[in-house]
Image (cartoon, grey):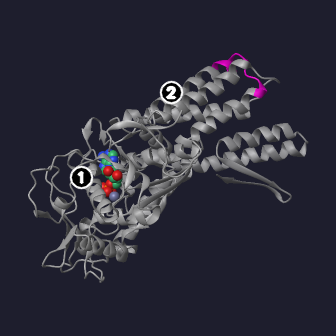
Amino acid sequence: MALRLFNTMSTRIEEFHPLRDREVRMYACGPTVYDYGHIGNFRTFIAVDLLRRFFRQSGYSVRHVMNITDVDDKIIRNAARDGVTVQQYTAKYEKAFLEDAAMISIEQPTLVRATEHILEMAAFVAKLLEKGFAYRTDDGSYYFRISKFPEYGKLSKKDFSGMQDGARVDVDEYDKDSARDFALWKAPKPGEASWDTPIGPGRPGWHLECSVMSMEELGESFDLHAGGEDLIFPHHENEIAQSESGTGKTFANFWFHARFLLVEGEKMSKSLGNFFTLRDLILRGHKPSSIRYLLTSVPYRNQLNFTFDGLKQAAVSVERLRNFRMRLSAGIFSEGASPEMQSLASQTVERMTAALDDDLNTAQAQAAIFEMVRQANAAADAGTIRKGDVPRLLAALTRFDEIFAVLDDDDGPKMKRAFEWALTEGREQDVSNELREAVQSGQHADAEIEEKLAAMKAARGARDFKTSDTIRAELAAAGILVDITKDGIRWRRK
Ligand code: AMP
Ligand code: ZN
């Protein structure tokens, strides 16, 4: 069955079909790099990552573009406060964002940066001006005239029929219920970054950045545009207005929005003290894989209530899956195959695919794999798993992990990097004992690996290749790759 996805534009679940055969072109609004990313941001980025991975698993090639907003009101304000250039200010947080995304196994999309497309944005403003959709104000700013675009409000389902023509707003985020002509281009202000362009000096508005860069990378019409639910209005509504009046074509076919995350039942906010960056959680000793697992465990359109109990539970779930894989790859089973295990594996794959086809129902896909693990563990206890069942069961796990990406145990080195970052940032007091222990036991793990390698060498010396292969498979399941060369045996982490 084909993938069915909720489309914010139609407010219905629709069958997904790309505009071009077997190719998906998708754009996701990326971070504004003025601070470290919080777990709410990463809920949305992980939802988009799952979607991208599932498109690929379903046989599509995927072009996935994401912007880095590296110039906006907040960035300019903070850079001026710190007495550094916008580029100096954003470089640190862009790097941190990419490290964080890799930490929770988000595959990197093609990145586009606002500051690298300023001239194209100015050219787009000139086009809107020529077509009568934009006007210039005395200070040299440009605004979009929404009364010229009668479909304004079609994404957010807001009725703006009584709006006041010519009322303007020049901040990027504004009152959710007001329709105002919004800034496409902002004239320079003292102390602010600005660029010289054919339409005059200034800088682009945030909405314009996404319109211009997405169309540049993916074409005037593409398949899917994604972001968190807060972006529906005004950001995406404005992107549609600009793009569709500029091109006369439908901008994006599908609009995909992830629901906001709550923390312990409340809106996350610094004033409530329940605001967590990804790094805060790692400093408290939580594993990246547990965080990823928890953030994927609730379907993207449902409210995800982040709790520390839930995070502990997620760690147990990941451990269970990893142990099961280890049990299969290191275990010794009798010859043959059992029809029950064969059909369990194939039914699990079908159930996972059907769940994800159903508007990315991640909770059901996870339930399917755990049911398989439960039944297969019981079979292993009873001695009814056969050698021929192992590849099929492992293949089901691999298929699960192509989407969820939690099976490889690379938490140790990732936590070590976070620990080192905390020391260089002078945040040693925030490092929990749990993180210290995890980092130390990661170092012990190296010694354990050496021990296993020694056992492998001894086995090979005695021409006991079966034992050697079993140890090697066990290490591989734990994310340790062993290379056997004529010069000896070496290992590395995956
Ligand atoms: P920003 O860096 O604020 O532009 O946000 C980056 C992405 O994170 C956007 O897609 C936002 O919609 C999303 N986002 C922000 N806060 C949350 C939250 N609490 N839950 C889920 N997504 C969020
Ligand atoms: Zn955007």
The secondary element bearing badge 1 is classed as: loop
**Residue 85 screen position, x and y as percent:** 32, 77
Left or right of 15 on screen, residue 348: right
> Alpha-carbon neighbours of circle 1 within 10 Å: few (<14), some, or many (≥20)?
some
Q: Which mark is residue 285?
A: none
Which amino acid, by three-letter code, is at mark 2?
Ala
Confirm whether the magenta stretch covers residue 384. yes
Nearer the camera: disc 2 or disc 1: 1
> Alpha-carbon neighbours of circle 2 within 10 Å: few (<14), some, or many (≥20)?
some
Vertical relation: 417 (above or below) 453: below
Give how far apart the Cα atoms at labels 2 and 1 are. Answer: 42 Å
Query: Pointer 2: what residue?
Result: 367
Left or right of 461 on screen, residue 264: left
Which quadrant does the N terminus fall into? top right
**Residue 246 screen position, x and y as percent:** 31, 65
Vertical relation: 391 (above or below) 67: above
Foreground residue among 298 and 213 = 213
Q: Quadrant of residue 79?
A: bottom left
Q: Quadrant of residue 460?
A: top right
- At 30% from the left and 77% from the top, the residue drawn is 84
- At 77% from the left and 23% from the top, the residue drawn is 337
Query: Pointer 1: what residue?
Result: 151
Going from N to C along the chain, the mark reached first, 2 or 1, is 1
Q: Which residues are magenta?
A: 378-388
- At 64% from the left and 18% from the top, the residue drawn is 378
Which amino acid, by three-letter code, is at mark 1?
Glu
Q: Residue furthest right?
A: 463
> Is residue 447 in view from this perspective?
yes
Left or right of 423 on screen, residue 237: left
Q: Is mark 1 within 8 Å of ligand 2?
A: no
